[in-house]
Image (cartoon, rainbow, N blue to C red):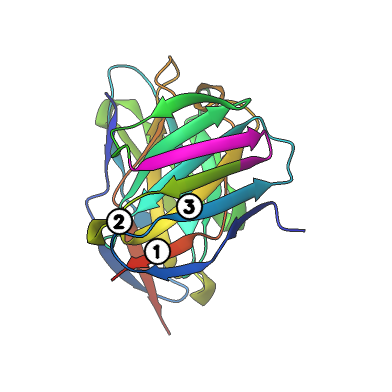
Amino acid sequence: AQSVTQPDIHITVSEGASLELRCNYSYGATPYLFWYVQSPGQGLQLLLKYFSGDTLVQGIKGFEAEFKRSQSSFNLRKPSVHWSDAAEYFCAVASPFGNEKLTFGTGTRLTIIP
Amino acid sequence: DTAVSQTPKYLVTQMGNDKSIKCEQNLGHDTMYWYKQDSKKFLKIMFSYNNKELIINETVPNRFSPKSPDKAHLNLHINSLELGDSAVYFCASSQDIVTSGDEQYFGPGTRLTVT
């Protein structure tokens, strides 16, 4: 069964600073990988996803993520954060073969300070 | 137009009661889901329907019963509510099943509080 770990529960960065949120997965092959964002009081919104091919994927709102097979990681990055990026970020994994569910990490809460 | 809507947004009820949460999507998607998000923000799949057929039924108490009257609706009925059922319940939909990699669109959530 697949699983995903987000080691950082809470991260605080200054507005304009760069950001990297960590995500590690456990799966026997290359899974489908996703990053979702949840703003306060809202549902989740997809930022980006990786299935295959180019290991650097671009998403919405200026986010990107890099798949590293050797490290079983799919870290999310943004070169310069904005106050509106404050939210909860979830990494998720799905098996490309049967097992129809999306498994989420425990989330990383991002706080932006002026 | 809201893509995935849920009603009610907030639900406060007492232990032992029976309640329902409704979900509707106007995206024309074939697959719908129910997730539970606990107080620590952990999000876990409960059920998934594809073309009104149940395809995921995680280990949830049988007090929880989903119903999909048509592809655009997936309701969640909960019998004999318990304190531990307090959570935010999210409905989601996608064009196809998870293995297709389609994006899941989430509703705004229903915050259930059991007292």
The three-letter code of the residue at mark 2 reads Asp
Mark 3 vs mark 1, CA separation in Å: 11 Å
Question: What's the mark number on residue B104?
Answer: none
Whether residue B61 is visible to the viewer of this picture, yes or no, is: yes
The three-letter code of the residue at mark 1 reads Leu
Q: Position of residue A12 (x, y in %)?
A: 31, 72
Q: Residue at x 31, y 49 (%)?
A: A22
The three-letter code of the residue at mark 3 reads Phe
Q: Are marks 2 and 3 on the same chain?
A: yes
Quarter of the view holding residue B41? bottom left
Residue carrying label 1: B112
Q: Main secondary structure of the magenta part?
A: strand
Q: Residue at x 49, y 66 (%)?
A: A39
Whether residue A78 is visible to the viewer of this picture, yes or no, is: no
Which of marks 2 and 1 precedes in the sequence?
Answer: 2
Q: Residue at x 53, y 23 (%)?
A: A53
Q: Chain of mark 1?
A: B
| Number of other residues with Cα within 10 Å of mark 2, as a class: few under 14, some 14 to 19, many 20 or more | some
Residue carrying label 3: B90
Q: Are marks 3 and 1 on the same chain?
A: yes
Mark 1 vs mark 2, CA separation in Å: 7 Å
Which of marks 1 and 3 precedes in the sequence?
Answer: 3
Magenta range is B63-73
The answer to whether marks 2 and 3 mark residues whose Cβ atoms lie closer than 8 Å is: no
Apparent side of residue A90 relative to residue A39 in the rendered image (left or right): left
Q: Chain of mark 3?
A: B
Residue carrying label 2: B85
Which of marks 3 and 2 precedes in the sequence?
Answer: 2
Q: Chain of mark 2?
A: B
The answer to whether marks 3 and 1 mark residues whose Cβ atoms lie closer than 8 Å is: no
Quarter of the view holding residue B58? top left
The answer to whether marks 1 and 2 mark residues whose Cβ atoms lie closer than 8 Å is: yes
